[in-house]
Amino acid sequence: MTAPDLAFETHDHARCSHNLLARAEAIAAAQGARFTPVRRRVLEILLEAHRAMGAYEVLERLAAEGFGKQPPVAYRALEFLVEHGLAHRVRRLNAFAACTHPGESHAPVFLICRICGAVAEAPAPALRAALDAAAAPLGFVAERCTIEALGLCPACQGAGAVPCN
């Protein structure tokens, strides 16, 4: 597992990004999927900061680097990354974040800072187990579950931001 379980912790970001990119390439290859230069660059962009990015923000970066200006360029790459478990859609923000646990079966919990927009993907096996336990008596099998929590990251708390209740 890589170090960025919580984006709010100090860590070697270049190393963490490099490791996640290498894992993503291996996962795509194992799944027989083409990890094109555009798909790779979109994942690199998502990995550059621990926050979710909208498709148009990603598109602006791609266009500035000569990858094309049409929205399908970004949307197709983002869709590929989500489909192959390399990124997640953060619905509250209508944005995307690189998966910090690619290739692992997990139910992500996104901790979203309402001030700076940082997003951390936290492991939450106990929450997944509770969901499965609640669903089982009803004969339901949950295939996907994403939880999003809005709050304050340590940096914004340290800067004096006050939690909302």
Image (tube, rainbow, N blue to C red):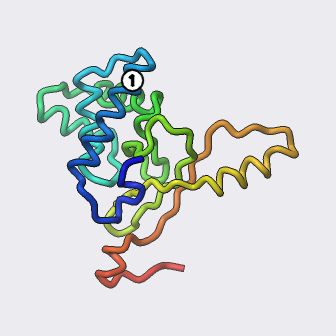
- SS for tag 1? helix
- Give the image quarter of residue 97: top left
Q: Which residue is mark 1?
A: 28
User: Is 131 situated above or below 161?
Assistant: above
Q: Residue furthest front?
A: 1
Which residue shows up at 36% across the image and 79% down it? 157
> How many numbered dots are placed on residues in this image?
1
112, 126: nearer the viewer: 126
Q: Looking at numbered disc 1 in the image, what kind of residue is underneath it?
A: Ala
Residue 62 location (% of width, % of height):
19, 33
| Identity of the residue drawn at 12% across and 27% down | 66
Q: Reply above or below: 21 against 137.
A: above
**Where residue 87 sits: x, y (%)?**
41, 38
Q: Could you say where residue 50 lies in the image, as x and y percent from the top left?
A: 31, 54
Looking at the image, is 18 positioned above or below residue 40? below
**Residue at point 46%, 61% (across, down):** 111
Q: Is residue 80 left or right of residue 123?
A: left
Left or right? Give the position of 67 relative to 116: left
